[in-house]
Image (tube, grey):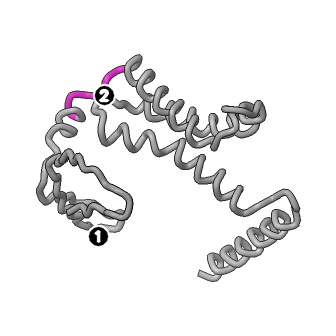
Amino acid sequence: EKKSVWLARISVIVISIIAVFVALDPKSSVFEIVSFAWAGFGAAFGPVVLFALFWKRTNKWGALAGMVSGGVMIFVWKYVIAKLGGVFAIYELLPAFVIASVVIVVVSLLTKAPEKEIVKEFEEVKSGTYRRKLQGSNSCDSVATLNLTVLPKQYEIVEKTICQGNYYEFN
């Protein structure tokens, strides 16, 4: 336990030293660093999560290619393409997200489809209580319970004219 406390303390010191050096750079901004980090997460994992949830043809190779291409495109766009300026000077998340999505579709279609059991499980998801028994390493088992509610798609078309000074209240 003492070892993990010392490791945690050393980690805090190292991170603090890095933060000091970042803060000393007059061109650096925490907002830019955080924005770039979130762009990386969004482009690498966002399309994969969406396609895995909503497109049953997504496979592991498409997902992996989408993560890699999204992560790489963040750097390529920010440090190469955005430097061209004009319409290319946009936040790198947008083009990287689009590229990752296209790569997921193309690679998933060019490689073996998911196995029938996976597709069947994808199609059978419905509301209910799902339980899984998880075996622990030291004979301590756990039960994970998921209460899932799948709501039907609902939509309503509203056509209203709103004049200045008036408002419309949605239900």
Q: Secondary structure at mark 1?
A: loop
| Residue assigned mark 1 | 140
Badge 1, how many Cα within 10 Å: few under 14, some, many 20+?
few
Residue 11 in the image: state x and y as whole percent.
Answer: 71, 71
User: Residue at left 51%, top 30%?
Assistant: 65
Residue 114 in the image: state x and y as whole percent.
Answer: 30, 28
Q: Which numbered disc, 1 or 2, marks the residue that appears first in the sequence?
A: 2
Most foreground residue, 112 or 91? 91
Most foreground residue, 37 or 84? 84
Task: Please state which amino acid type lies under the numbered disc 2.
Answer: Arg
Determine contact: label 1, label 2, CB under 8 Å: no
Residue 47 in the image: state x and y as whole percent.
Answer: 44, 40
Task: Please state which amino acid type lies under the numbered disc 1.
Answer: Cys
Q: Main secondary structure of the magenta part?
A: loop
Most foreground residue, 154 or 170? 170
Residue 99 in the image: state x and y as whole percent.
Answer: 53, 30
User: Residue at left 35%, top 39%?
Assistant: 52
Mark linked to residue 149? none
Residue 110 lies in quadrant:
top left
The quadrant of the image that shows the N terminus is: bottom right
Magenta residues, as a range? 112-117
Q: Indicate whether residue 113 is drawn in magenta.
A: yes
Residue farthest toward the top in the current orientation of the protein: 110
| Residue assigned mark 2 | 57
